[in-house]
Image: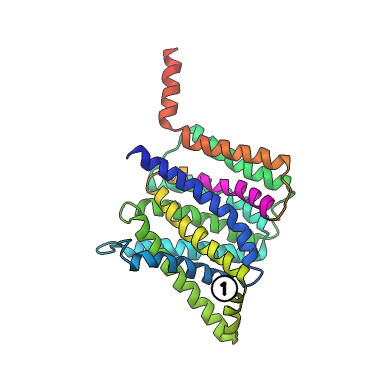
Amino acid sequence: MNSSGIKLAYLCAVLNALIIGFSFVFTKIALEFAEPLDTLTFRFAASFAVISIPVLLGRVRLNYRRKKLHKVLLLAILYPLGFFTLQSYGLKYATSSEGGILFAFTPILTVLLAFLFLKETTTLLQKLSICLSVSGVLFIFIMKGSRIDWSNMTGIILLFLSCLIMAGYNVLARRLLKSFSPAEMTYFILGIAFLSFLSVSLTGHAAAGTIDQLFSPLASGTFIVSILYLGIMSTLVTALSSNFALSRIEASKMSVFSNLSTIVSIIAGALLLGEEVRMYHIIGSALIIAGVMGTNLLGNKWEEQVLHRAKAG
């Protein structure tokens, strides 16, 4: 595997975290105009429409012949269908801070699943680096005064399951990307998600006689801008970038980049919402960055070199 491909994979992983970090702000804005399910419908409508353009023009070629599409269907059920459904209902019973705390554990779950199903191994230093990154996220939330209210067990369990599903997606996608290109996988997943959310949303509004409410948010330019960001950048681009990264680097290394989105959300909050950046934000961010770098730099070869130098000395 050439070094340029690896470098591009890491660039995609960082880009993924940057986009997701800003998505929290745009999601907050979109939800002021529409219900969560309707927002997801428009979000995936935008993403699927945009990716369909180069496919229809023949610029992106897809070949699903003799490929195991049922496995990609399982992937789509995991993410985005399962993830967003569990997350949405989980946040009904728990706070967004509790969601952020639990989501920080996704890299640890990914390491466990990657070891069980992909036989991916991580060194002790990499495991410690992942824990360091997670501790950075937890430090920020705890210093903000956030805590997990164990009386909200329904919400906590649902949010934990959403994290487990995200970890499962990272592992299964890593395996399937040996047979499918990132574009083929992304197109199929987005298509399934769009049709699923649209069907549920239309059925719900038709039963309630509120079809007009489904389309009324489109009268707002602010809502449209938010949906375009969420659909094109935070869904399509992140799906392509994460799938490309997973095709080049291990799931355990890729997953830890998700914690960088915490840093980006702090920056986005400061720039767009005027939120204050405190010292604990800076300390927690430093821990996250150190953990991400450690996970991806302190691999087997690095440890072997250290041991070799120690023996030579």
Quadrant location, the N terminus: top left
Left-right relation of 273 to 110: right
Residue ID for mark 1: 38
- Percent x, y of residue 285: 63, 41
- Front-lying residue, 128 or 267: 267
In magenta stretch: residue 258: yes
- Front-lying residue, 161 or 238: 238
- Percent x, y of residue 122: 45, 37
Residue at 61% x, 81% y: name it.
Answer: 213
Residue at 58% x, 65% y: name it.
Answer: 225
Please tell me whether residue 97 is drawn above or below residue 34 in the rendered image.
Answer: above
> Which amino acid, mark 1?
Asp
In magenta stretch: residue 164: no
Q: Which residues are magenta?
A: 254-272
- Outermost residue on the bottom side: it is 209
Quadrant location, the C terminus: top left
- Percent x, y of residue 104: 59, 48
